[in-house]
Amino acid sequence: GSSAAGGAAAGSAGGGRGPLLAAAELEASLLRLAPGLLDTEEAAGGGEAAGETAELSPRPASYDPLLEALRAYWRAYSHKQCAVYDVLPYLRALPAASLSALLQQLEAEVGQPPPPDAPLGERRAWLRRFSALGEWRIGGGAAAAQSVDERRQLAAQFVAAHASAADLAAAMDEREVRPADELPLLAAELQLGAPMVEWCYPSRGSAADLASAALAAATLQAGHAASPHNAQLSVALCVALLCLGAPVRAVKLFRGADIKQVQYESLSHIVLPAALELGCPTREGELPLLLSGLRRWRQDGLRDVAENTLLALRQGHPAQALELVAFERAVRGSWWGVAAAVMERLVALGASDGSADAARSALGEGSPLLDVPLTASQLHAMPDTLDLESLTTRWPSASALPPPPAGSPSVPEGSCGALAGLTLSPPPPSASTVRTLRCDWLPRRQRLLRFLHLYFGGASSAGSARCLFPPPEEAVLCEAEASLRELCGGGAAGGAGGEEGDEEGEWEVLLSLVSASTLVAKLAAAGTDAAALEARAEAAISDAAAALSRRCSRVGEGMRASGGYSPPAQRRLVHLSQLEAPVAAALRSRWDELLPAGRKAAASAAVRTAAAAAAKAMRAAVEELLVRLAGAPVRSNARQALESDELPLPPPLRDGPRKAVCEAVRESEAALLKASREALRTSATALASG
């Protein structure tokens, strides 16, 4: 203890950060080994084990070495940007009572803000210390223990401080980072009660209630308006808007950041696939440009990497060449590359005209992507190329695993990469973030596309006349159906559990259509003696039509809810219009190919009749949904929350920021309804033509 205190004193006397951090590291290590040492009164009454430990290093009850080391660091470096990440592990090592006492003392030291006419240097120094205190509070976990109201009150202080600091940046270039830019980010984390990495993919699960998301979006909008070139604010605002179901503005904001080259690979996960699932238009606007940019990078950018590798070898830089080779292998084999290819096929399928030929074109032919079903072991072995460190956060993740043992190869403790668990194989299923995308969202859709690819003849037509498209072998098709059911009915590839919405039939329609299609393919290959198979096929087709009708009814009810439709209802509408209805129409067309009139009439006549009746029922359900969507104006509950007088917005957010976020939500509402109606009309037309 005395040596650590001496090191802290040496650091504060001008020895730099090293001695101060070494003192904190020493005391934090001792605390981890023997937690009772921090409070000697507890150690004295903690039983035989605590007493034995205390005898090894007796300390006076009034002296706390770790707290003293942190105080010494604060006095020397609280005005520096390094004042947060330097000490996060040590703050998180403190018991809650000790952390609370430390924060109270530091809050008293920071005090009230200087008057507006104080020297700019004094005001900037106070602002930096005020921001650092907030970061210590959040990073140490004290904010996580607060109630929602307490966190909102603290966030309101950050918002007020940000607004009052506007004049500090008056003489700065607009591209420079402003002195108060951290404050909106801290306020948003307080309002949402989660690290930014867990805001990702809000279409997979709500990170907070709508009021909190609305507060965070308005806060970040104010920060972005004041500092439009701050990448952190832009990224955070993108994700907050996705939480509110506003993908159009989110993608515009992301594209406006001038994403280039490898950034398509490493950063596009911030808005994809959430923007797709929330109804961002795929035929016009910014999203098609983002998807094409990602595709061009994977096609052309990697060629540039190969050329640079040769150039490095010619210039005598073998180490650089090896790094480029490793980078190229990681990108080519990354799981995000598979996800990008799956998203492209889903977009093409949703935009098809509902015919079997259009489905074949959308799915592609001869792609290794659809040769075999993705498994958990394959996904965990694929390289990860996503940049999660851009999602700067201080909030300790409740879903993160304990830090790895000292010396183990991993990303830094407390970093976003560690919180997301991407370095772990297999990752735990407890967090609904990138892990869900990688281990649940992706394999489900890959296996669905694989089944469709097989069913439409994409894998079996090589040696056949193109107009025939014979069905695949029964064993292959049954295996493809079983592999899809394995995920949709029994948990994710990376662990137990499924996607949000499964309990309301998220995959009921698609699984019913797959089951009916498998039986139709069996019947087409069975010959005339297939009475039992015929009855099963008729029942399965009727079940699929009933499932789609129920789905349309539930979606219509969700979109016409009195309080406005929710982001989950929004996702269900997109899932229906962009995936379920187009797949139903395309499979209906494929059934006609497999069981044409005049061939095997004895075995297929009743099934053709059942298929026609099912198509009629599905078309009627889709058209009824279109009527409901065309009624009175449809509003989201996110916009209603933003426009409500009960939303506890701090004064600086009540006008411009609220209006801007409302406009973003309104823009996405219009785009969602327009794209969904067009897709549903196309599917209804295709079902009628069958």
Image: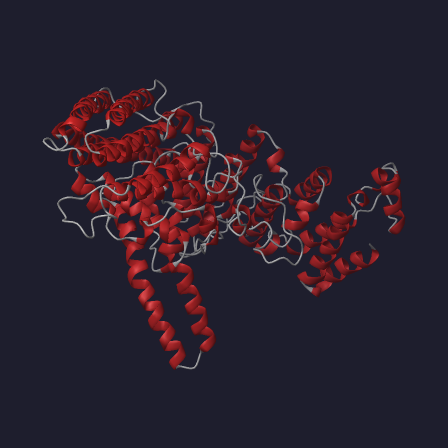
Say which of 205 and 63 sits in front.
205
Picture residue at 70% right of the left edge, 41% below the top: 99
Residue 334 image-quadrant placement: bottom left
Q: Residue at x 56, y 33 (%)?
A: 151
Can residue 262 be seen here? yes
Farthest-out residue, top: 562
Residue 312's x, y, as percent? 40, 77
Is residue 230 among the parts visible in the rendering? no
In this image, 658 relative to 587: left or right?
right
- Furthest toward the front, the residue is 529
Q: Position of residue 607 (x, y in %)?
A: 20, 25
The figure's colour scheme reads: secondary structure
**How many numbered callouts?**
0
Q: Residue at x 16, y 37 (%)?
A: 355
Lateral position of residue 104 relative to residue 127, left or right? right
Q: Please state, as top left, top right, bottom left or bottom right, where the C terminus lies in the image.
A: top left
Comparing 121 with 342, the one in front is 342
Which is more toward the observer, 548 or 181?
Answer: 548
532 in relation to 441, above or below: above
Q: Which quadrant would the N terminus be assigned to in this image?
A: bottom right
**Rendering quarter of residue 220:** top left
Is 96 displayed left or right of 462 in the figure?
A: right
Question: Who's the residue at 35% across and 52% down the image?
Answer: 257
Q: Is residue 667 above or below residue 288?
A: above
Up the image or down, 65 lies above or below 188; here it is below
Residue 579, image x, y percentages: 28, 35
Q: Position of residue 401 (x, y in %)?
A: 60, 44
